[in-house]
Amino acid sequence: MTSLLTYTFKNLRNTSKWALRFCVRPLSSSSQVQAAAASQTKSKKTLAKPNIRNIVVVDGVRTPFLLSGTSYKDLMPHDLARAALSGLLHRTSVPKDVVDYIIFGTVIQEVKTSNVAREAALGAGFSDKTPAHTVTMACISSNQAMTTAVGLIASGQCDVVVAGGVELMSDIPIRHSRKMRKMMLDLNKAKTLAQRLSVISKFRLNFLSPELPAVSEFSTSETMGHSADRLAAAFAISREEQDEYALRSHSLAKRAQDEGLLSDVVPFKVPGRDTVTQDNGIRPSSLDQMAKLKPAFIKPYGTVTAANSSFLTDGASAVLIMAEEKALAMGYKPKAYLRDFMYVSQDPKDQLLLGPTYATPKVLEKAGLTMNDIDAFEFHEAFSGQILANLKAMDSDWFAQNYMGRKAKVGSPPLEKFNTWGGSLSLGHPFGATGCRLVMAAANRLRKEGGQYGLVAACAAGGQGHAMIVEAYPK
Amino acid sequence: MVASRAIGSLSRFTASRTLRCSGYICRSFTRASALLTRTHINYGVKGDVAVIRINSPNSKVNTLSQELHSEFMEVMNEVWSSSQIRSAVLISTKPGCFIAGADLNMLNACTTSQEVTQISQEAQKMFEKLEKSTKPVVAAINGSCLGGGLELAISCQYRIATKDKKTVLGSPEVLLGILPGAGATQRLPKMVGIPAAFDMMLTGRSIRADRAKKMGLVDQLVEPLGPGVKPPEERTIEYLEEVAITFAKGLADKKITPKRDKGLVEKMTSYALSIPFVRQQIYKKVEEKVRKQTKGLYPAPLKIIDVVKTGIEQGSNAGYLSESQRFGELAMTKESKALMGLYRGQTQCKKNKFGAPQKEVKQLAVLGAGLMGAGIAQVSVDKGLQTILKDTTLPALGRGQQQVFKGLNDKVKKKTLTSFERDAMFSNLIGQLDYRGFEKADMVIEAVFEDLSLKHRVLKETEAVIPDHCVFASNTSALPIGEIATVSKRPEKVIGMHYFSPVDKMQLLEIITTEKTSKDTTASAVDVGLRQGKVIIVVKDGPGFYTTRCLTPMMSEVIRILQEGVGPKKLDSLTTSFGFPVGAATLVDEVGVDVAKHVAENLGKEFGERFAGGSLEMLQQMISKGFLGRKSGKGFYIYQEGVKNKNLNSDMDSILASLKMPSQPDVSSDEDIQYRLVTRFVNEAILCLQEGVLATPTEGDIGAVFGLGFPPCLGGPFHFVDLYGAQKIVDRLRKYEAAYGKQFTPCQLLVDHANNPNKKFYQ
């Protein structure tokens, strides 16, 4: 017990020192050199497989991610998705009629546009002959959109697919209560005045109380923040560690933004408002400021606060995915290959947010790679505590043996390769759109910093998770 | 074991000192040496917070024993005298248990009420000191916090509990016929208000952590944690300790106040209760209710009311004195001894003395989706057992499935289950009309209609499809298992499992073994029963086994008494006032008149004159008129959906009149009627022990109380003989024997006990 405390204590000081060092680390060419050196010692030269089509990401874009309730608040989800699609068309100049299929991910569905992919595609001027569907898998919805595209191309059904995701948390479908809905439907069926009156006579005032979209896990009735707080506690992660990690995310995002590294962002002229050009949730603060916040979920002693959680975000993203030969034939220079991927799921109560821990070793094994082969890690940051818990879980033999049925831990990713351009904590997390952002961040980082393999991983509600290997396209 | 624990605690302790704060190194060594002798408590210091960890060796639970008491006192004195320590945390490192109550052996060892009072007063003193501690003490509660454990916790300045299903708080003393004897009668009313305190102490109910928080019984909740880099249970306790330490510091620094905000309703209630007149009304009301429910058979609840009243109206000194004195008196009562005996018996019957079965049952199949079959399925699926429910027609199966769903859904309504958990449990149930999947069954329990030829057919059909290792259990209340097993190819795998209706409410399971039943089959049946949450007695095969056999002569007497002109209402009131939870006439209606007749006929043939008494003609006439009891809507009473007060069935008058017998005045006083019923029951129970149907008196008592509703205050037939005196019972029996003959002849074992007053069923 005591030793554990002292251990965390020591650890904490280490991380804080490290964080300080990191914050002032200038962008130097040394990382590129290191990465280049590393690529010569890879387990595999490439992940191309015989007799399977190579699938590439030509390019990808996203709207600026904004705090919900700001500039996008009067839009509808398909407006945002349309902006991402238009941006992609503009960026890649892909002829609209070449696109075989469009897939979008989204979580909280606007009931009027439940197939938001189709509505957005039509509005963005795609051919009305291009089919489109919408997928949902909580925070990995656009990952699912991309891997669905991969499947369609790999099986030879399509050559060119647009995958994306959208979320508009500024407006959510708030419903009438079930009782009220039932009464309204009954009223519809009532033919005579007497029947109508008898239906209306059943009305009670409490019918008017509205029903909000679930913020909590359906199976456990626990909110995600609450679960994250428990997860952080289970892995003995302190408030200070979480605040430090959040500060790191914001600092790195700020730097990436300032240095123009977030090249996937396309400006969006919002009707009736100014053109939005950049993410507005990046706010590096100070540890002292962050320490003042009260816990948001487990009151009064929890460790998850507004400052170390991802915030409600509006945004959309889209990527152009093609068969390699098609892209080359069209004269494109793709950014990256999409390689092996993996979906996992586990206990939605106590391991809700541990998806990356489960998915990472599996996808590496499937691809025949090790942690050392990865040059760029892009993990979805739902909460600081969740990221740190995943890092600890990946670094624990005990956890690997007792919960994952593995002989040994996979190891924790080195932080100098980890979310170095910020993450969901700072850039924002529009649920349905984050997956494409992660893939593009990995691809762009590999191009910029010169590595070969990137690993994308994310957790999702329902206790699910995803990981995918992104391989840089040779220059 | 003990030594290594102590040394372990020492090394941990010293490590914490050297690593954390150099200032503590100068603590005297005499204290450190005292640590070596501590076995229940591990004590360390974190910063300026003392952490007192309780973990009694070699026991599943922590109990407040004299040893623990003195070690705790010693540690607290150290806490109070040390200038570095500003606050303390009290926690148990035993998984699933804070402190489960006082050590019952300590109470049982006392021979006089003065001794018990003495124990109570010592505890009172210690807890009072704790309550007045200037250094705040935080109780960190994970697992059961009952009786003395709760009294300890509420003496602390602050309570933090884990929101775990295992974390329950309560004052169950009343269930043992005593009262909370270490200050709870005085502290609880102040803490949670008079009505809630009465509810806790008079019902003994366990309160879950979240409810306790709402009541003000605990101040903070801590969610249990999932897996991290060590087992969840271990880390949860660690986390609870960490949280408790921050609150202890906060309390010492006066950043947190232990007072909580009361809601408007609570404020109004407490205002109302400050008016003496309102309080008097409450005492009166509660007392009336208690008298009505206990019929004056249980002294503890009335004493609890009295003690609480004394404390509030005359001040806490008088209250404490009254508490300790009443505690001493109650501990010496027959009722308390009977109830404690039952408690011990219940604990014994929750163990599998046949060892673990060779193959654990994973797939269960239940034949017959009637009331019993569906009930058995329900208590199996909600424990995660895969269960096939088979019937022959879709409507019958549908009814059974609905019963299981309703049983689970009622728990959702009571918020003990979530709808999601309900769905997951319900998915363990597979309803079907054929024998598909039986080839993978590990146990089949048949609950088809009580008809030997039908049971034979079902057994043969089942044996044709089940694997060799599969156990075939028959749920029957009276058909001998040996007879059912005659058509079996593998009688060693055939066993009886007699459930009681309603299965999800009745705790008892009577397991019946034939001479051919193998030990492993028994072990398997007991294992399944325990997993279903049952209290289990294992008896030998024979007509009526144990429970039905005891009940039948009593039922025969019921009919005779009715024939002698005592009305059903009067009979019911006589039996309930003796302590039976259900009146005798109502019981016939509940069991079903046809079932009662069937059993009475069968057993009458087997046992002859001893089971005679009333005329079966009465039951026959009732059946022919369709008065089958509750299930048909009419029996002795009329049953209507939604009508609470049941009325007598006036159509019974003619039947009763036609079968009227003259009563014998010298054995027909109210008391005689009660004893005619009870002595026939008791005599038959003892005969079961004499004949070896019962293995132990404990099982006899548990079976009678939990299966048949024998008055708990008497502790079961065997406790009753021990406490009431065998001679008195024999005298009664002889008196009735003179009037009615052989039905009342005392059995040899009872006579032996009467002849030798030193002979007791429980030594």
Image (tube, helix red, strand yellow):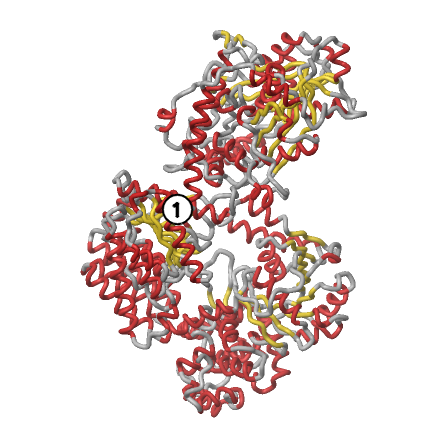
Q: Position of residue A259 (x, y in %)?
A: 51, 11
Residue in view at x 49 percent, y 18 percent: A253
> Is the C terminus of chain B in the top left, top right, bottom left or bottom right quadrant?
bottom left
Q: Residue B749 versus residue B224: which sits nearer the camera?
A: B224
Q: Position of residue B579 (x, y in %)?
A: 42, 72
**Quadrant of residue A463 in the image?**
top right
**Quadrant of residue B434 in the image?**
bottom right
| Secondary element at image label 1 | helix
Rendered view: A141 above or below B605: above
Q: Position of residue B745 (x, y in %)?
A: 51, 89
- A243 with respect to B253 (left or right): right
- Viewer can see residue B122: yes
Q: How many numbered marks, from 0 up?
A: 1
Residue under label 1: B241
Rendered view: B51 above or below B509: above
Q: Position of residue A457 (x, y in %)?
A: 60, 28
Q: Residues within 10 Å of mark 1 (few under 14, many from 20)?
A: many
Q: Chain of mark 1?
A: B
Residue in view at x 56 percent, y 42 percent: A399
Q: Residue A286 versus residue B339: which sits nearer the camera?
A: A286
User: Please, which residue is most extreme toward the right here?
Assistant: A51
- Disc 1 marks a residue whose amino acid type is Glu
Residue in view at x 71 percent, y 53 percent: B432
- B705 with respect to B693 (left or right): left
Q: Residue B740 versus residue A87: which sits nearer the camera?
A: A87
- Viewer can see residue B217: no
